Image (spheres, rainbow, N blue to C red):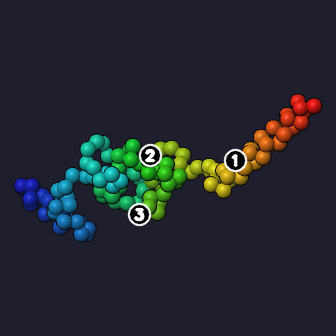
């Protein structure tokens, strides 16, 4: 059996609509679309090449999203290591904290001025 027969057999034996060209093409990172480097299976419900990505791309992507939920299948990427469920400061909380610190330092400055001026 030559390569073309093998590919046709794979296409015929699956229910997917992948073309021969898609099967022959090298797997790409679904995030950066590059084929260089080692690709990791995400462990979500996506199948085939859609489940592959570079580890560094995965870390950047899920860190920016602040969770491990796949944007395609909406399932958790089980093979992704790390806690991306941040409970960080929201913009409103950060503004409130900065304002409170500004007021606090202002009051301390007024108190110091009052104590040392007399």
Please tell me which residue lies in front, 72 or 56.
56
* Residue 100 x %, y %: 75, 48
Q: Residues within 10 Å of mark 3 (few under 14, many from 20)?
A: few
Q: Residues within 10 Å of mark 1 (few under 14, many from 20)?
A: few
Location of the N terminus (image quadrant): bottom left
At horizontal 53% and vertical 52% (from top left) the residue drawn is 66
Q: In this rendering, is residue 40 above or below 75?
A: above
**Is residue 45 found left or right of 20 in the rendered image?**
right
On the image, numbered disc 2 is attached to which residue? 59
On the image, numbered disc 3 is attached to which residue? 72
- Examine the image and state in which quarter residue 105 appears: top right
At horizontal 41% and vertical 60% (from top left) the residue drawn is 45
Please tell me which residue lies in front, 31 or 73.
31
Residue 30 showing in the rendered view: yes
On the image, numbered disc 1 is attached to which residue? 98
Q: Earlier in the sequence, mark 1 or mark 2?
A: 2
């Amino acid at each position: 059996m030559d390569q073309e027969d093998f590919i046709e057999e794979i296409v015929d034996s699956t229910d997917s609509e992948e073309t021969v060209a898609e099967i022959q093409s090298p797997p790409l990172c679904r995030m950066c679309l590059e084929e260089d480097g080692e690709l990791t299976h995400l462990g979500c419900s996506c199948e085939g090449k859609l489940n592959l990505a570079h580890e560094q791309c995965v870390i950047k992507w899920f860190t920016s999203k602040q969770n491990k939920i796949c944007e395609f299948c909406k399932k958790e990427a089980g093979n992704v290591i790390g806690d991306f469920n941040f409970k960080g400061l929201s913009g409103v909380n950060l503004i409130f904290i900065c304002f409170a610190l500004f007021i606090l330092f202002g009051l301390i400055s007024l108190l110091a001025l009052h104590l040392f001026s007399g």
